[in-house]
Image: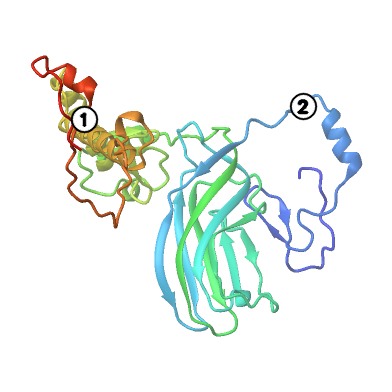
Amino acid sequence: MNTSRKTDRSDRDWQVNGANYHVNHKYGFGVLDAAALVNTAMSSNWKTAAEQHKCREQEKIDNKEILPSGTFTSSIFSTGCYGKQDCVTKLEHVRIYISLKHPRRGSLRITLISPSGTKSILLAPRQKDVSSDGFYNWPFMTVFCWGEDPHGTWTIKVEDTLGFKFTFKKWTLRLYGTCEDNRELLPNESKICEAECKKGCPVSFSKKCEKCWHYCNCDTGSCVPACSDTQSTDYENKHCHQDLDELSNSSLESHDKKGKVEGKGEMSTFVKWLIIFIMLAVLVTSVMMMWLCKKSERFCWSKRKKKENVPIKKDVMYSRVAVTPEVNSSNLKELGNLQNPTLVT
């Protein structure tokens, strides 16, 4: 970027960004000067870039319906995450995410305006894009802000070129660059902080000190370089407030810990009902298994004893028979008191 040269000077799209670079939607940063690039890289003053940081600003929800042929504008105030680990003071590129509904998104023109006034056309009208899907968290990127300080108000401008009605839902801003904190504090900023920053923030601190980098901590009534992670940041008024969600979460966590300590060694109601349910399930399963085994007769104890089937003859007539013993000499000898018996025939 430092060694590029402006080309086609007659083109009217050239603009100078906040870091004094010439940018153009057709030619970018201009033509590359290879000789100047090599000389700069071999110079003893050459310094490599610092580690890239990513600053994510809070999402802004608009949910606004735009009339046909109307233009929508929305703004986000950014500090570049100043005072935090992911701070960005020197931009490399900017990415925004947009969500909107539109019956023909090819008729839209979207422009991003940086705090330094640099305009980046993120989306130009496209005749062949007739999609009615709109955009949902759709990313757009620009490098026109290269070298600029992100601190300030970023504005997005959305306009329809064919007379369609659309709904703009939300957008968010992400800044990519390095954190080279060379900002100079105002000589009287400390005095203004002591005089105007009060506990509870009864007045807007930004109105009392428009060019101040510090924020007023409304919980303590003192100036701080940046709000802490547990505080919410009011960028417009430069106020820091204790985040209510953090307070509620911390109180809930402490309550849970206290309950765990007090209830240590006792079985919870849920565990008791779970044990009862498991025991009932085991009992029912056992009964069902026994019934199925009895039904299928797969085990010896479940088999029934079979009765022996004795064949019964049918259609047989029975009659009474008188049996007379045979009388002979051998039978008579056994009597002993009979001699010379006379056989009667």
Question: Mark 1 sits on what residue?
Answer: 275
Report the disc number at residue 45: 2
| Quadrant of the drawing holding the C terminus | top left
Q: Residue 21: x and y, percent?
A: 71, 50
Label 2 – label 1 distance at C-alpha: 75 Å
Q: Name which residue type carries label 1.
A: Ile
Examine the rendering and report whether any part of residue 259 can be seen: yes
Crowding near the residue tagged with mark 1, few <14, some 14–19, many ≥20 C-alpha atoms within 10 Å: few
Q: Quadrant of residue 282?
A: top left
* Residue 79: percent from left, percent from top: 46, 44
Residue 52 vs residue 344: left or right?
right
Q: Residue furthest top?
A: 336
Spot occupied by residue 12 in the image (x, y as percentages of width and height): 75, 69
Residue 312, relative to residue 178: is it above or below? below
Report the disc number at residue 309: none
**Image quarter for residue 105?**
bottom right
Lateral position of residue 152 relative to residue 315, left or right: right
Verify CB contact (< 8 Å) between mark 2 and mark 1.
no
Q: Nearer the viewer, residue 29 or 142?
A: 142
Left or right: residue 344 versus residue 56 is left
Q: Mark 2 or mark 1: which comes first in sequence?
A: 2
Callout 2 crowding tier (Cα within 10 Å): few <14, some 14–19, many ≥20: few
Foreground mark, 2 or 1, reads 1
**Residue occupying the point 31% across, 42% down:** 310
In this view, the residue in front, 294 or 317, is: 317
Tell me the SS state at disc 1: helix
**Colouring:** rainbow
